[in-house]
Amino acid sequence: MSVKTNHNLAEPCWFLTFTCYKWLPLFELTNSYDLVYNWLEFISKRAQVQTLAFVIMPNHVHLLLYLQDLTVDLNKMVSNGKRFMAYELIKRLNEQQRNDILLILRDGCSEIEKSKGQKHRAFEPSFDAKPVFTDKFLNQKVDYIHHNPVMGKWSLCSEFTDYPHSSADFYLDDKRHSCLNIMDYRDYWLGKIPQNE
């Protein structure tokens, strides 16, 4: 039996994952990595949500976020972000005349959704969110995020620090990311999160 994550917990640090519909590589197909960067910058300015670590894969995104304002509605924030990105992804697919992909995304909408005006499904409807309570979990997720481009079926680069859509280079080679301001989790969290084994 699966247990639904309580996204309404008043916790400052979260590990999030959201995925393109049917794991289609929509970010890669439309070169839309910028959409995720724009959304992360937007929530940083609008809601004081800081990015601690991230990777934007061709078909999914992993994030470690720090909520400075604990009244932020995580569900609404992610839903609005996915809606904004979906609109632009569909626009770019139309510009590229990717009717094959658009048909799959159109078929992903239920009749109820179509009756409400939704024409395509760019993302899986739910997202995964886990609160970070311990530095052990934090380090595990940072490591997972950074190694994602070279794990399993992925071979997006030879060295994981070379993948451009990740915070790995920021942490391991001390290089500022060209598209996103990253808040160093080591400065803000190590030693502040209870060390529960």
Image: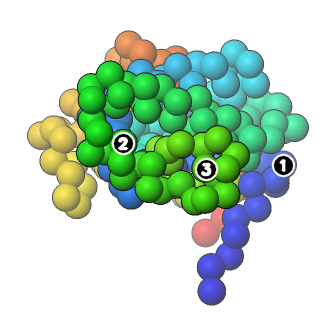
Q: Nearer the viewer, residue 192 or 14?
A: 14
Q: Which residue was labeled with disc 3?
A: 114
Q: Earlier in the sequence, mark 2 or mark 3?
A: 2
Q: Earlier in the sequence, mark 1 or mark 2?
A: 1
- The residue sitting at the right extreme is 71
Foreground tag (2 vs 3): 3
Q: Residue at x 61, y 59 (%)?
A: 111
Amino acid carrying label 2: it is Leu
- Which SS class for mark 3? helix
Picture quadrant where residue 73 is located: top right
Work out how far the residue at label 2 is from the one at label 3, CA to CA, in angstroms. Answer: 14 Å
Q: Residue at x 52, y 19 (%)?
A: 38
In the rendering, at what x and y percent does residue 5 appear?
70, 64
Residue 10 got which mark? 1
- Which SS class for mark 2? helix
Q: Which residue was labeled with disc 2?
A: 102
Amino acid carrying label 3: it is Lys
Q: Residue at x 35, y 17 (%)?
A: 175
Q: Nearer the viewer, residue 124 or 99?
A: 99
